[in-house]
């Protein structure tokens, strides 16, 4: 129970208080603004994290939606990013819990092979940063209450049957 309380304290309470204080500053400034919360694909897909982690990341989606309703009247947009398989110290440490000597490069290769529809492509922290910059920009001026999934397509499809998209070989394709 202690671990669950700690995860809730960091993941949920941090976002709740960050949103609250950012909103207060933006409301008093009177110029609107953008709040971007960080969640995880564990919020929308089971089996990607512990129960505590998953429930806190799902809660951030609800907070994002309800805050966008409340703060839209002040011209404040509230959105959320949901990264997946992003090469980060947290991901590498998670792998090292199972394989002690695994390198960051090996984790990156595994993610590119198994956690993305973009074969060989692992998510990078720069991918998340670009998404956040977009949501904070004027180009995203009519986007609020949105959860932007940054996952190389992983949560939208299954790669287990991609063989059906490949060209079928005919008998003439095989050497005699």
Image (cartoon, grey):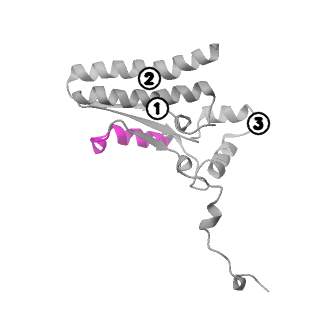
Quarter of the image where one finds residue 97: top right
| Residue under label 1 | 38
Image coords of residue 17 (percent x, y): 41, 18
Give yes or no for contact between labels 2 and 1 (Cβ–Cβ under 8 Å).
yes
Q: Which residue sits at x=58%, y=16%?
A: 6
The mark lying in front, picked from 3 and 1, is: 1
Q: CA distance from mark 2 to mark 1?
A: 8 Å
Marks 2 and 3: in contact by CB < 8 Å?
no
In the rendered image of this protein, does residue 154 appear above or below residue 92?
Answer: below
Q: Name the quadrant of the C terminus.
A: bottom right
Q: Regarding mark 2 in the picture, which secondary structure is present there?
A: helix
Q: Secondary structure at mark 1?
A: strand
Mark 3 touches mark 1? (CB < 8 Å): no
Tell me residue 103's x, y (percent): 70, 40
The residue indicated by pointer 3 is: 99
Residue 75: horizontal and vertical position, in percent? 23, 31
The correct choice, above or below, for 3 with respect to 59 in the image is: above
């Amino acid at each position: 129970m202690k671990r669950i309380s700690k995860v809730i304290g960091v993941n949920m309470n941090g976002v709740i208080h960050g949103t609250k204080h950012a909103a207060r500053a933006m409301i008093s400034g009177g110029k609107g603004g953008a709040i971007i919360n960080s969640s995880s694909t564990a919020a929308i897909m089971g089996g990607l994290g512990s129960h505590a982690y998953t429930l806190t990341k799902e809660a951030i989606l609800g907070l994002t939606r309800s805050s966008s309703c409340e703060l839209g009247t002040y011209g404040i947009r509230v959105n959320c990013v949901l990264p997946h398989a992003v090469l980060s110290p947290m991901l590498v440490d998670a792998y090292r819990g199972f394989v002690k000597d695994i390198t960051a490069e090996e984790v990156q290769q595994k993610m590119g092979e198994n956690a993305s529809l973009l074969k060989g492509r692992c998510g990078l922290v720069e991918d998340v940063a670009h998404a956040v910059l977009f949501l904070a920009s004027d180009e995203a001026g009519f986007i609020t209450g949105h959860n932007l999934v940054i996952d190389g397509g992983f949560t939208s499809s299954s790669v287990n049957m991609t063989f059906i998209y490949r060209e079928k070989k005919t008998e003439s394709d095989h050497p005699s």
